[in-house]
Image (cartoon, rainbow, N blue to C red):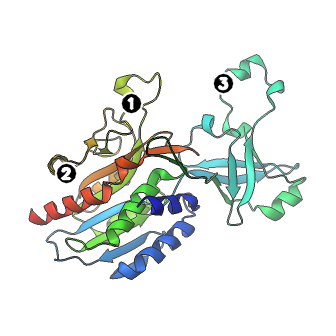
Amino acid sequence: MLETLKTLCYLSGPSGYEDEVRDYILERVMPHADEVMTDSMGNLIVTKKGRVAPTKKIMLCAHMDEVGIIITGIDDDGYLRFDFLGGVDRRVVIGKRVYIGKNRIPGVIGIKAYHLVDKEEEKNVPKREEMYVDIGAASKDEAEGLVPLGDYGVFDDSVYEFGEGFIKAKALDDRVGCAAMIKLLESELPCDCTFAFTVQEEIGTRGAKVVANRICPEVAIVLEGTTAADLPDVPEGKTICKLGEGIVIPFMDRGTLYSRRLYSQVTELADMNNIKWQTKHMIAGGTDASVIQRSGIGVDTIALSAPLRNIHSPASIAKISDFEVMPELARLLIETVLKD
């Protein structure tokens, strides 16, 4: 799963431009799938038969997209203007490397030179409108020949392990969930399951809404990354969750009040199988679960999440031991749902 995750994080797939990620996943799962389709939104839907047919339709879900930028204008001097795809903290992008479009045109996000900043400006984070991408173009014509308006950009894709079992990468949210679903698809399943690799989660859970209405699941397991704020000077009550404390099983976030039945079942399963777990200690974040749960006549929904520091940034950080248990815990939950 770790090597699969690394490969997925190297790929470019910001919201609305998930083709590269979808193509890789499709290549990996085709030999193990019974049915595969891509819908008009770009969601990849994979069905695999298991040992038995369940009495309830079970769907697992992870989103393929990552946060990034979209090019909105080009200055006379060849600098690119942009907006964000998804929720990105302006503080973390200044000076960061980006790659634009399928041709991976390299660039750097810049701002006004420091010696031109007055004392009042120095106190504030520059607005997105004050930033630009420098691709080394000498003119507007040169830049337009390289980058069309509406093209996407992703952050630097370096991936590396460090410390005692940590990994740094962009797009850990939610390539970690995609990697877990690939591992499940490559194994024998307890029962028939549908796997939804969704698009455009970062700009409003758009793909999941379409998928849920198409599949009409009765039980949904959302595999995700979630915010960990276990950082210096953050009060204990606001850390949300912590790296190294295990997989996160939330009872609620800003979009979903998760199924109490599934929450009780999966936490008991984790305890019985010596799987380290934690829950969120602050109501924060949101996932595809919000639209899945409220689709059709309602769906029993639960999430299994990897805690991530610096989420939605060029340098997200995870601890391998927290997420490598995700496929096994999902499998155990599927087996329990079968018995209901």
- Residue for point 13% across, 66% down: 338
Q: The N terminus appears in which quarter of the rendering? A: bottom left
The residue at the point 67 percent across, 20 percent down is 123
Percent position of residue 110, x then y? 75, 40
Residue sitting farthest toward the left: 340
Q: Which residue is mark 1?
A: 239
Amino acid identity at mark 1:
Thr
Residue 251 coordinates in the image, percent (x, y): 25, 42
Return the residue at label 2: 266
Query: Looking at this view, is 163 or 278 the one in front?
Result: 163
Given contact means CB atoms under 8 Å apart, are the residues at marks 1 and 3 in contact?
Answer: no
Instruction: Classify the position of the C terminus by image quarter.
Output: bottom left
Residue at position x 34%, y 71% in the image: 185
Upstream in sequence: badge 2 or badge 3: 3
Q: Disc number at residue 124?
A: 3
The disc, 1 or 3, on the residue closer to the chain's N-terminal end is: 3
Mark sitting on residue 277: none
Q: Nearer the viewer, residue 151 or 158?
A: 158
Residue 224 visible to an observer of this rendering: yes
Give the structural element (helix, strand or loop) at label 1.
Answer: loop
Mark 2 belongs to which amino acid?
Val
In this rendering, the answer to whether 187 lies above or below 165 is below
- Residue 93, placed above or below residue 338: above
Image location (x, y in percent) of residue 310: 51, 39
Taking 88 as reference, is 130 left or right?
Answer: right
Does residue 114 appear left or right of residue 281 in this picture? right
Give the mark, 1 or 2, whose residue is nearer the N terminus: 1
Q: Mark 2 or mark 3, which is nearer to you?
A: 2
Q: Amino acid at mark 3?
A: Asn
How far apart marks 2 and 3 lie (CA) works out to 44 Å
Q: Residue furthest front?
A: 164
